[in-house]
Image: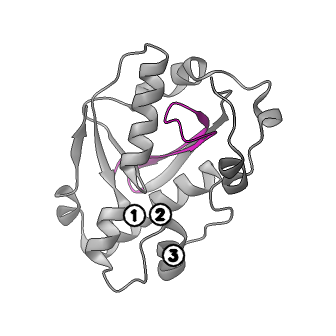
């Protein structure tokens, strides 16, 4: 399997307020690389978001703005590439809104939501939050709501599902993000 697991953290309820981004790159069913960056958002921080992820305004004071980060990661978002996330509508929405906010073109790429796959394959779990699914499957999740740890955990969920159920059933969950 080849894919990229993506996770954003946001500074506020505004979808374009990305304050960190992580990507975990998987090739031939192996994690081969990771990318992480703090992002200086074009918005104020809301205390509740800070409480969740622990990123403060001072932490991103010298961080790059999103367009600079996008230059490094844009090649992963192509028509034939699979980009996954746990609660993909949120992360895909943050990406789309942030690109729109900075007047950058929105790419088309394949996407898959591991919340949906975990609901299908593990209906008996008490819920399908990232930390719950990781606990139930024995996947390490060191710092929940740290984008890098979350993207790695998401990648490991999909790899677990592929190993136990095969890749064919997973294809039904792939959609085009446009």
Query: Which residue in the structure is indicated by mark 1?
Result: 159
Tag 1 near tag 2, CB within 8 Å: yes
Say which of 61 and 140 sits in front. Answer: 61
Residue 74, given in percent of the width and then of the height, sits at 44, 25
Q: Secondary structure at mark 1?
A: helix
User: What is the number of the mark on residue 90?
Assistant: none
* Of pointers 3 and 2, the one earlier in the residue sequence: 3
Q: Which residue does the image show at 55% across and 18% down from the upper left?
A: 67
Measured along the vertical axis of the image, is residue 53 above or below residue 156? above
Q: Which residue does the image show at 40% across and 70% down from the upper left?
A: 160
User: What is the number of the mark on residue 156?
Assistant: 2
Segment tinted magenta in the rendering: 1-29
Would you say residue 78 is visible in this rendering? yes
Label 3 to label 1: alpha-carbon separation: 17 Å
Query: Which residue in the structure is indicated by mark 3?
Result: 132
Q: Residues within 10 Å of mark 3 (few under 14, many from 20)?
A: some
Measured along the vertical axis of the image, is residue 152 above or below residue 40? below
Residue 64 horizontal side relative to residue 23, left or right? right
Q: Residues within 10 Å of mark 2 (few under 14, many from 20)?
A: many
Say which of 97 and 4 sits in front. Answer: 97
Residue 16 in magenta? yes
Q: Secondary structure at mark 3?
A: helix
């Amino acid at each position: 399997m080849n894919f990229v697991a993506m996770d954003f953290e946001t500074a506020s309820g505004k979808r374009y307020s990305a304050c960190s981004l992580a990507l975990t790159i998987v090739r031939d069913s192996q994690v081969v690389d990771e990318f992480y960056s703090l992002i200086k958002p074009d918005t104020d921080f809301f205390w509740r978001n800070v409480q969740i992820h622990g990123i403060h305004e001072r932490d991103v004071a010298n961080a790059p703005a999103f367009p600079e980060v996008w230059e490094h990661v844009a090649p992963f978002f192509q028509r034939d590439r699979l980009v996954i996330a746990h609660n993909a509508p949120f992360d895909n929405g943050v990406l789309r809104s942030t690109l729109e906010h900075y007047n950058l073109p929105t790419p088309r790429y394949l996407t898959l939501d591991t919340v949906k796959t975990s609901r299908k394959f593990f209906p008996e779990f008490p819920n399908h939050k990232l930390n719950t699914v990781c606990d139930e499957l024995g996947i390490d999740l060191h710092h929940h709501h740290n984008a890098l740890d979350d993207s790695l955990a998401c990648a490991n969920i999909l790899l677990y599902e592929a190993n136990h159920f095969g890749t064919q059933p997973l294809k039904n969950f792939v959609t085009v993000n446009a």
